[in-house]
Image (cartoon, rainbow, N blue to C red):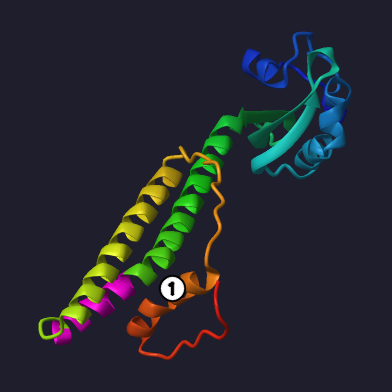
Amino acid sequence: GPEHKIAMANAPFMQMVGLKRKLNGLPFKDALPELDAQGLTGMISEVYRSGKMQTGSEVPVTFRARRGVLNQIVIDYVVQPYKDLNGNIREIIFYANDITRLVEKRKRIEELLRQKDEFIGLASHELKTPLTVIESYARLLSRRGFDDRSVAEEAVGAILGESIRMKDMIAQMLQLASGQEQVEAFNFVETDRHALIEMTLRPMRKSYLRAFDLAGDGP
């Protein structure tokens, strides 16, 4: 009827809302006032008035379970009118399925996929520079290295250095992807900044065929 008294609340529904007391015979808004405040009673009234079924997917609802503890779950629901042979609405059937765990699992999968995409983007960006340096020095070695020992030594040294750097980067990325990243203690030492920057610029000049000038003196 229009008071929406609960005729039967089965065991799965009682388990879902976390109640043990009987709800049969109580108006829906009195039996579950927190759900009434979230608009479910109004929705049931609309189905009773219109005779049209309503559904909801992944709807978060909060209710007060035993000992007054607030609990939030995510449900799929169907509110369907039950009619007699004359087409008069006799009852409203409210069916709800707790899908909280399924939603949580889906969100975890989505987060893992997001992290995978982020990891691939990071790896592509970070590996581009050493690969470019290796390719440039390999081309230099191919053009001039066999005729000029100093060029060959410089190219081989750069290729070896960038290969080691790339190996370390890949190891760090794989460690990060496996979720086993460890924070290592920093070991600070004095560094000749001028020499360090010059060492960085040297392969860049070869790789990009551009002039990079470093002003000032070290350290």
Place of residue 212 in the rendered image (x, y in percent of width and height, measured from the top left) = 46, 87
Residue 136 sits inside the magenta stretch: yes
Place of residue 31 in the rendered image (x, y in percent of width and height, measured from the top left) = 84, 20
Residue 84 visible to an observer of this rendering: no
Q: Nearer the viewer, residue 101 or 21?
A: 101
Q: Quadrant of residue 134?
A: bottom left
**Disc 1 target residue:** 200
- Left or right of 176, for residue 40: right
- Left or right of 204, for residue 15: right
- Left or right of 98, for residue 48: right
Residue at 74% in and 34% down: 61
- Measured along the vertical axis of the image, is residue 5 above or below residue 167? above
**What is the quadrant of the C terminus in the image?**
bottom right
Furthest-top residue in this view: 21
Residue at 32% in and 75% down: 132
Residue 162 sits inside the magenta stretch: no
**What is the quadrant of the N terminus in the image?**
top right
Place of residue 100 in the rendered image (x, y in percent of width and height, measured from the top left) = 61, 32
Magenta extent = 131-144
Q: Circle 1 — which element? A: helix
Secondary structure character of the magenta stretch overall: helix
- Measured along the vertical axis of the image, is residue 173 above or below residue 193? above
The type of residue carrying mark 1 is Thr
Q: Quadrant of residue 157?
A: bottom left
- Measured along the vertical axis of the image, is residue 194 above or below residue 26? below
